[in-house]
Image (tube, rainbow, N blue to C red):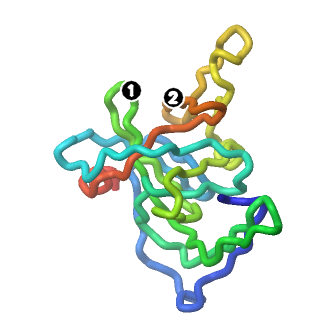
Amino acid sequence: MAGDFMSSRKLANTAGKKSNKKTRISMISTRCISADSRNIARVRSNRQCQDSLRYENCELDSRADTCCAGSTFKVIEYTGQICNVYPYCPKYKPRTDIPVVKAVTAYDHPNGDTFILCLNQALNFGDKRPNSLLNQNQLRYNGIVVNDCPTFLSPNHESPHSIYFPDSDLHLPLSLNGCISYLPTRIPSECEIDEGT
């Protein structure tokens, strides 16, 4: 869905205006998922307050030039920018007016903890795209270690096949669907977002 390049511009009705509203996620790590301040929060999982347990894949995708929020992300802030996203093939039409957002998703770790992952400048595809895309190089640029080599393919089977947050010594184990590494994520409930903010 995200292509070789994109163009961006400010929305006409927000040009020159700055939002005073700031959303803060309580941090385990000061850097996560995308540019600027990237955050990750640990919340207590309360199955009674979860809106949905529909999981989709948050896939690693080196073809995307930025992270893309799909159907399991909830927008918490609009940046006022929009982008046109150009596909890999010039004969396909670009997707126009895609908003750039700050959005969160929930990841249920195998140890029972739930983490709220925050993308600060992601393209918001919402329900138009079930799966979300994480660009490995964008993550690495922001201090996150991406071990995207599956363990069974790594020398001596030593790859943890995970996304690692060094500031908090946290590994989020990746799953594999064919040749695509991913985190299974879901829409966070309002109480999970409130607990993490």
Q: What's the residue at 63%, 82% (across, down)?
A: 10
Amino acid type indicated by mark 2: Pro
The x and y percentages for residue 36 are 60, 58
Q: Quadrant of the N terminus?
A: bottom right
Residue wearing tag 2? 173
Secondary element under disc 1, as helix, strand or loop, is loop
The x and y percentages for residue 51 are 25, 53
Q: What's the residue at 21%, 41% (across, down)?
A: 47
Res. 148 in view: yes
Q: What's the residue at 54%, 87% (across, down)?
A: 14
Secondary element under disc 2, as helix, strand or loop, is strand
Q: Nearer the viewer, residue 125 or 79?
A: 125
The image quadrant that residue 157 belongs to is top right
The x and y percentages for residue 119 are 52, 55
Q: Residues within 10 Å of mark 2 (few under 14, many from 20)?
A: some
Q: Using the image, tell me which numbered label, if any, was put on residue 110.
A: 1
Q: Which is nearer the N-term, disc 1 or disc 2? A: 1
Q: Quadrant of the C terminus?
A: bottom left
Q: What's the residue at 74%, 67% (across, down)?
A: 86
Q: Nearer the viewer, residue 129 or 173?
A: 129
